[in-house]
Image (cartoon, rainbow, N blue to C red):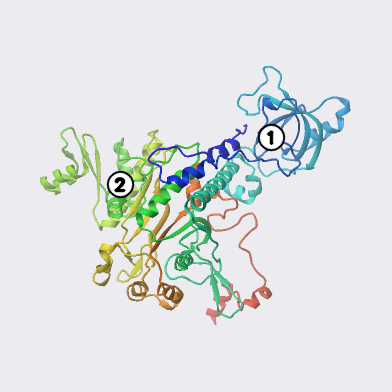
Amino acid sequence: MYFPSWLSQLYRGLSRPIRRTTQPIWGSLYRSLLQSSQRRIPEFSSFVVRTNTCGELRSSHLGQEVTLCGWIQYRRQNTFLVLRDFDGLVQVIIPQDESAASVKKILCEAPVESVVQVSGTVISRPAGQENPKMPTGEIEIKVKTAELLNACKKLPFEIKNFVKKTEALRLQYRYLDLRSFQMQYNLRLRSQMVMKMREYLCNLHGFVDIETPTLFKRTPGGAKEFLVPSREPGKFYSLPQSPQQFKQLLMVGGLDRYFQVARCYRDEGSRPDRQPEFTQIDIEMSFVDQTGIQSLIEGLLQYSWPNDKDPVVVPFPTMTFAEVLATYGTDKPDTRFGMKKYLKRKDIESIRNFAADHFNQEILPVFLNANRNWNSPVANFIMESQRLELIRLMETQEEDVVLLTAGEHNKACSLLGKLRLECADLLETRGVVLRDPTLFSFLWVVDFPLFLPKEENPRELESAHHPFTAPHPSDIHLLYTEPKKARSQHYDLVLNGNEIGGGSIRIHNAELQRYILATLLKEDVKMLSHLLQALDYGAPPHGGIALGLDRLICLVTGSPSIRDVIAFPKSFRGHDLMSNTPDSVPPEELKPYHIRVSKPTDSKAERAH
């Protein structure tokens, strides 16, 4: 399987001016800078021993003397081999004359995936032997000298796209898996999109790239945090789940516009498609409202979007939390498809079983015939006026199927949302294309509730987003009367049914922040005394957002997992299979941190006594 010459296209595409799909949103500053941003393709062979990359050679290089370095991808009958580097493949002719016996010996005896350096002349392939599927398929290299730089031992798997490998094996030998075309493409596209984001934020809009500490203190609410011991007995650092407090403090400090490619950490246990450490594009601005943040992100994505995808059209549609829950049954709907159904009777039974098995909930199907009469047992239990109102609200047509359930509003909506996706799964197994992988459907979801009841104690409240989210201006009075009904200035960005970003306008008033923390959330305000004090010293109105970079790149590349767009990811259990991390630490190394490990057998023995 040959590599396409994709790298040059990638760099050209990501340095292009964006296509105008709506009115430009960057103004004269963008237009003037764009004229100076027409960069040439990077020079990949500067500062190194090679003269060219394997994937760049064409007929225009005929007669040139070149030096190439790479891995032996394939060898046939000791007459030629295919050399591979990050940029592509090139065919190398193994010399057969006696005077080049030493070169032939090196190239014929080196195992596949060995690293070699060859020098020779670019020549045309014989007539009829060109390979149109290979970007370098019109030429080959007539070798004069060769050097074996490093021989390769027998591999645990072949470095070929069509060779199936278990994910555990890929993670165990990640350094080999990184040689694959897909991993090379994913990581290089990720790098280029981040570079374009930096350019857009810093060069076009005056953001300041600031690094924030990794060692911090425990934050109330949110996900569990990793703890790091200190040499002071009983005192620990925490790894931040986001730079939330720091970026707000930067606004208090007058930095005005902050940006960071931030490493974040969450101890969430075994989650199939989550990582304990992940990366987000972290943004904060002063004197901004929700509309300003949304416009910024739309422009950022439009500017950094790869050229080989359909252009991003702005503005993105917006729905309220109540609307998406009522319409789609979830706050992160996949809006690439509607509610078209081509279901058979046996599918309905399967869906009913799914609801019963997973949610212990009954589903009642309604089939509409030519006269839009109901073919369902439920027809006997509702009034005619109710039936007509349902038909009107759902805009049902002839031959439609309606799924009904009853129960608490949020739970019933959530069930129907999952059944919508289950229906899509059923239809797509039958060849009905609903979720086009080449289509990118963005959606803003706004007006989330400010608080949710705690699962363990529904009479107590917890933040729906985080405790620094400002209430909706129209609902501030509800904080003192009916806080459960208060909406927030929290907004999420959804792409193809995945949340890729979330943010909010922040509370910049110390008194309001203290009231929400102490009175409504019952949190210890001493843990946040530094932030509350800062808000008292002239904090400007501010807001921000964080984009999940791993998830975004996963969707852009069409990868099945976020682990396919991270160089060295953890397994779904949070383990590094390559280095066997986490690992045990000898007791003498724990002593300075005043920690003693109690093994499960030790605790059982203690309970026995």
Q: Secondary structure at mark 2?
A: helix
The answer to whether mark 2 and mark 1 are in CB contact below 8 A is: no
Q: Quadrant of the N terminus?
A: top right
Q: Position of residue 461 (x, y in %)?
A: 33, 69
196 or 329, nearer to the observer: 196
Residue linked to disc 1: 54
Q: Position of residue 515 (x, y in %)?
A: 33, 74
Tell which circle, 2 or 1, labels the residue nearer the N-terminal end. Answer: 1
Q: Which mark is residue 586?
A: none
Horizontal relation, residue 231 to residue 79: left or right: left
Q: Position of residue 331 (x, y in %)?
A: 34, 53
Please, what secondary structure does the residue beneath circle 1 have?
loop
| Viewer-side residue, 474 vs 384 | 474
- Vertical position of residue 215 compared to residue 14: above or below: below
Q: From the viewer's perspective, is residue 507 above or below residue 387? A: below
Query: Residue 158: x, y in percent?
Result: 66, 39
How many marks can you see? 2
Q: Nearer the viewer, mark 2 or mark 1?
A: 1
Answer few, some or many: residues within 10 Å of disc 1's Cα (few below 14, many 20 plus, some between 14 and 19). many
Whether residue 49 can be seen here: yes
Residue found farthest to the bottom: 609
**Mark 2 lies on residue:** 352
Does the image show residue 275? no
